[in-house]
Amino acid sequence: MTTAVAPPLLEDTNLGPKAGGFYRHQTIWTGLGFGIFLGFVAWLVSHALLQGSNWGSDMVVTCTMVGWVLGFNIGMGTFNAPIRWMLGHDQTHEDELYAAGVGQGRYRYLKFCTDHKVVGTQYLILVMVLFGVGGTLAMMIRTQLITPHSSFLDPQTYNAIVTIHGMVMIIATIIMVSGPFANFIMPIMIGAKDMAFPRLNAMSFWVVASAVPCLLATFVLGGVNAGWTTYAPLSVQAPPAMDAFAITIIVFVVSVTIAGVNTIVTVVTMRAKGMTMGRLPIFTWGAVIGSALGLYAMPAFLAVMTMMITDRVTGTSFFVPQVGGAAWLYENIFWIMGHPEVYVILIPPVAAVLEIASTFARKPVFGYKVAVAGFVAIAALSIMVWAHHMFTTGWAPNLAAPFMLTTELISIPTGIIFLCTIGTMWKGSIWMRLPMWFVYLFIWNFIIGGVTGIYLSDVPADQFFHGDMFVTAHFHYTLLGGAMIGATAAVCYWFPKVSGRMLNERIGKVAFWMIAIGIQVTYFGMFWEGFQGMARRIAYYNPHYEAANQMATAGAYLLMAGWLVFLYMMISSWRHGKLAPANPWFAKTLEWKVPTPVPLENFLVDPVVTSDPYTWGEDVPDGQGIPESAPEPEPELVPAGQAGTSEPVDGGTV
Amino acid sequence: MAITEAEHGHDDHGHGPAVEGAENPGGEHESAFRRDQKERLLMWLLISGDAFFLVLELFTWFYLRALNTSGLWNGAACSKANPCTDGLGNPITSPITRANPVHGIIISVCAILAAAFIWMAESAAKRDAGRRAVAGAAGLGFLFLLAAIGVQIYQFQVIPFTTIDGAYASTYEFFMGSTLAHLILMAFIGLGLWLRASKGRYDGGTWYRVRIIRFFAVWIAVSTVILVAVGALFY
């Protein structure tokens, strides 16, 4: 890849005293203050006016949550730009620079900041917090299941924890790659200076951040005990916590839709000169296809949760059969969202795995075009398989066979992606660094998750396994063992670019083995439970299942310990790690051609792309492509946390 | 006046001004061509997501209507001898009264007129007809949006059923709520268009930004007509 001379980029750190307008006074603290204030006012008013009416408690909770979300976002400055636009007061260039975080140091991470790298880092931290919460809830579940009649949790609390564990993890996994890396890395990968709509980008983050407290508030509102799928009519009858749950999802959908649209527009319209669609790094394809699929899935989530909340708050009867509704309607719309959503989660990390495999095998992505076609085929087929979640409900038995067929068909493009991954590594000179370790773990886990999924797509087998721990083990192998491990590989791979530091791989390998063994012990234990016939979502069980449960719980503790070691490695490396050079992996894609930390508008000169992203072997002399150890740090490296605020670094080419 | 790549000094891919100093003044340091390209795609993607939401609304209507659980789609099967129950457990002994289609028709006409005036504002801006012409058309569009919102709220007051009266009533009111939410969003944008047009922000060089709004206004009109038609024709 070569460059062309271009105008110098703006990196002004001496902004006027009025630059930024309201943004100057808005931080996470004003967001919290406004959120709590408006939530309280909404509670006060709705309590006074509505509490005595039908569905009064539900209305009060709904109003309070809406008040919190609006207040938080007003306080953060999320709505500043739309309101200024409406009033005809366009932002000045200085305002935009201020909003991009110029001259604000690390403080900008606590503000409405439009720099895509800041937003990506904010997402990364939010995802880690969500995994911390979800993981803690998972450990409570496994602790309860150590013995058949444990008194650690009562059944009501247990069900509430199972529900929120599921939804926290779903939210976290949907944004775990598309949030941090489609924001931080992808624009640089395609040669863009930022995302297409920087303010929408920041908005997507703070909107989803405002949804998280609503979800956690469910615990003090009586708990949602309907499982993460919140099937009707259970969810219609649930305590007012269900209203907070539904508001969480509605707000989350708004955020994911904004973020997804932004990703697609960025890739379609902001590519560097010469970056044709055929030259896009494979991760970019994954991010775009995942976002496009989300654009299909998320309206269904919005529709089903809106109908759910109107059933609860205004007495409509969408899902209540006694008054003309149908629980099948809920299940259909939910799974029209629910199965594509699995691929919204999976496609970006799988694409990241291909990216990493290529870099560390020093080979181009095997079957690049076939892999892209595979992603497209997975996305297309995933919208035609939803009813396999309903084989045992009695809905449209005549459609069981067609849905079984479409579900089994999806294993073909998935298998092709597998072949592409293995083909990329085949006969490569593999450089075994930490990201690559996780790529191997991903392949192992995802094969198990995928193969067990084929059993579940089969109608007769599903009649036996449905609702038991086999299903739980299957989707944990897929989503944790596959998607989350792929995302972990991505974290290890791009950490030097994000933080400016190298990870401590010695600690990382300890974490790796604990995680790898922990996953196998935990979920093989769950498969064992499932084969024995143990049902999901039960707090007490027959002593017959005790050994399998103890195995799963022991594995879960090991797994959690592994994640804690991994977290320690990340934090300690971020603070004290060895300074990272611009391209520690000698990778080929554009994000490794810019300095670390990355300047505000990424490129000191506009890049012009003249070749494919994976030109291994073309310009690296034989035997010199793989250094035996990490290269020495480049001179004048800047510590972590300074990305985007440094003075421009001179340089003519990238 | 069409926006062409050559006019704005772009490379083959429309990426960034090739000429140094060609950026727009103020906060927008990218070209009109790039902005238009981005915003058009954004709008089409948002409309496609919203269209899928509309499809799910229609699916809900026809699914519940076909299923007619407990005879309570519209209560046609309910009688004194065979009473159904509403959402509060009260008996329903006769079919639910059909909603008056006139309100929906008035709302649809207002939404269509609003879209038409916004389209006129776009045309006026495109031919550099002056601030007054653009602002006048945009203002009329905004007024029709307000009228549509007013009629929609009025329909909530006078509709002959409530949300608890079975599936037809629930879905019909859901359609009304969805229409109202879309109209309010469009009114926010319409107000912005009017205020900005009054300040002379739209002319032959920036008309394409009104076009983006027109896309959404037309979509709102189309979706309103579809919901009103289904609600009126498929009792």
Image (cartoon, coloured by chain):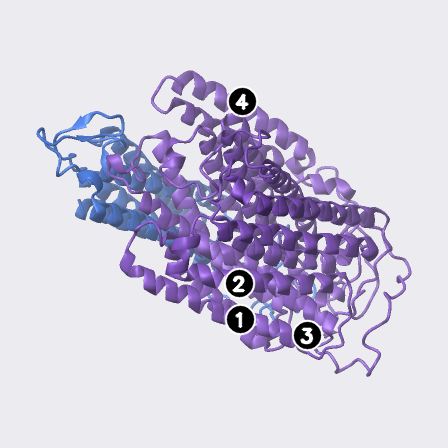
Chain colours: A purple, B blue
Q: Which mark is residue A269?
A: none
Query: What amino acid type should be assigned to the residue bearing mark 3?
Result: Met
In three-dimensional space, the C-alpha distance between marks 4 and 3, rounded to whole angstroms, equals: 57 Å
Q: Secondary structure at mark 3?
A: helix
Residue A415's label in the rendered image is: 1
Q: Secondary structure at mark 1?
A: helix
Do callouts 4 and 1 point to residues on the same chain? yes
B188 or A396: which is nearer to us?
Answer: A396
Disc 4: which residue: A40
Q: CA distance from mark 1 to mark 2?
A: 9 Å
Q: Which residue is mark 2?
A: A450
**A233 with respect to B74 (left or right):** right
| x and y percentages locating residue A492 in the rendered image | 73, 57
Q: Residue A425 shows which numbered tag?
A: 3
Q: Are marks 4 and 3 in contact (CB under 8 Å)?
A: no
Q: Residues within 10 Å of mark 4 (few under 14, many from 20)?
A: some
Q: Earlier in the sequence, mark 2 or mark 3?
A: 3
First in sequence: mark 4 or mark 1? 4
Q: Which amino acid type corresponds to the residue marked 4 in the rendered image?
A: Phe
Question: Are the residues flagged by discs 2 and 4 from a single subunit?
Answer: yes
Q: Is residue A434 left or right of residue B218?
A: right
Element at badge 4? helix
Q: Are marks 2 and 3 on the same chain?
A: yes
Q: Tell me, yes or no, whether the two marked residues, 1 and 2, touch with CB atoms within 8 Å.
A: yes
Q: Give the Cα distance between marks 1 and 3.
A: 15 Å
